[in-house]
Amino acid sequence: MDWKSFQKTDLVDEAVRVVNKLIERFPDSPDAHEARARVLLLIGQTEEAKVSWLKCLELAPDYGYAFHGLGLIETKLSRFKEAIEYYKKALERIHNYKDSVRELSDAYLKDGQIELAAKSLEDFLTINPSDSEFWLRLGQTHNAGLNFAKAKPAFEKSLLLANDNPKAEQGLITALIRLGERERAKELAERVKSRPKRENDSIDQLLVNERIDISSRYWVAALVYRNFQCYAEAELLLERASNYDPKNTKVLEMLIEQLIKREEFESAFQKTVRLTELDVSNPSYAFGAASLAEKLKKVSDAAHFYRCVIELAPNDSKAYKQLTTLLLSEMRKPEEAEMVALSWKEKDASAVPLAFLASAQALQGKLRDAEVNLTKAVELDPASEELKNRLAQVKRALDNQP
């Protein structure tokens, strides 16, 4: 979408049509009214958005997202005390909801309640200590309250988690100067100055947030359709959401679920690979890609993604088991299977990794090693007839050796 098409508001008009149709189809669904309210707020129809959120609460009195939305409206009207109460009600119903914590902190700050603004961020960070954005916000809040001793470690933590963070660098420089650490402030300022200057964002880049907002509205609308088992309509909306925000992992997850239900495994696999690229630290995405690759007989891809799971979640026994099975049965690589099983054995004290280790060793002719490991496995699981039979087979093979 370019600037010209956005000026025509084609995208916004389409989003309004989608949510209005949603209300027609599901007039008693609070989620439908929530989706409509979000779109209306986005395009500045504040009073209509308020009507929709109040309708949410009429249908579901504990609907936390409606309280959040009403807080957004009060914030736009600079009624911060009222906004604070709405955000607090939202958080009572949706614990630790990031958007409400962010808005609550900002409302406290704008209302002059700096200590409460900081506390709301600190409470969130106690549960989510790896959130660079909220450490930055905490530092900015402490700077606003002239509490530079507390601002400094908050900015440092934000930079530790995301070192390309100009706002955190600027905040830290300010805190250091006010704390009298002028040499360190000067060094940091020189490092910042020496970096290549960032080019101004293009018009298309400036529209990213608008596209993300619209995408999230499509996603909410898709949720409503899916909840009413209207899967075809949900999928069309999800595709639209994904087009406007290709990095939206929630949208991709739902699309993958739909594709798997229809047994379109190749398309599901490609989208799952995309998920692993968007979030390289998520072992569940890697496991999903591995499972789909295995179903599609993409053995090398499956092995690759199972190895990714093991790297990300080294105690995940299922990934070890699947990878070892692949190496033994499909890839015919008992040496690699043995190495994987040895690592698995270090993480899992049950009989299962020992049995797989013994299988890999037996295929390589390492019958003595296989016998030792199967003996240990039987000791751990004496009720297993399968393990006893395999141990007996290995012993017979040893007896028959010249």
Image (spheres, rainbow, N blue to C red):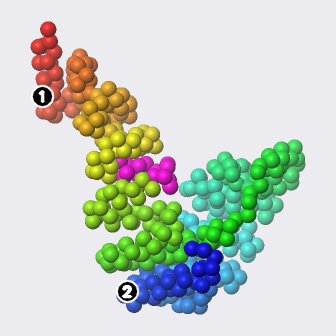
Dot in front, 1 or 2: 2
Towards the viewer: 338 or 381: 338
> What residue does disc 2 label?
26
Q: Is-magenta flag for residue 231?
A: no
Image quadrant in which you'd find residue 213:
bottom right
Tell me residue 72's x, y (percent). Answer: 61, 79
Q: Mark 1 — residue?
A: 389
Determine whether the residue tagged by mark 2 lies in a helix, strand or loop: loop
Q: Where are the magenta residues, as a range? A: 275-291
**Quarter of the C terminus within the rendering:** top left
User: Percent position (x, y) of residue 3?
Assistant: 63, 76
Percent across and percent down for residue 149 are: 78, 52
Residue 140 located left or right of residue 386: right
Dot 1 surroundings within 10 Å: few (below 14), some, or many (20 or more)?
few
Q: Based on the displayed image, in which of its 4 quarters is residue 322 positioned?
A: top left
Q: Is residue 267 in sight in this rendering?
A: yes
Q: Which residue lies furthest to the top in this view?
A: 402
Is disc 1 placed on a helix, strand or loop? helix
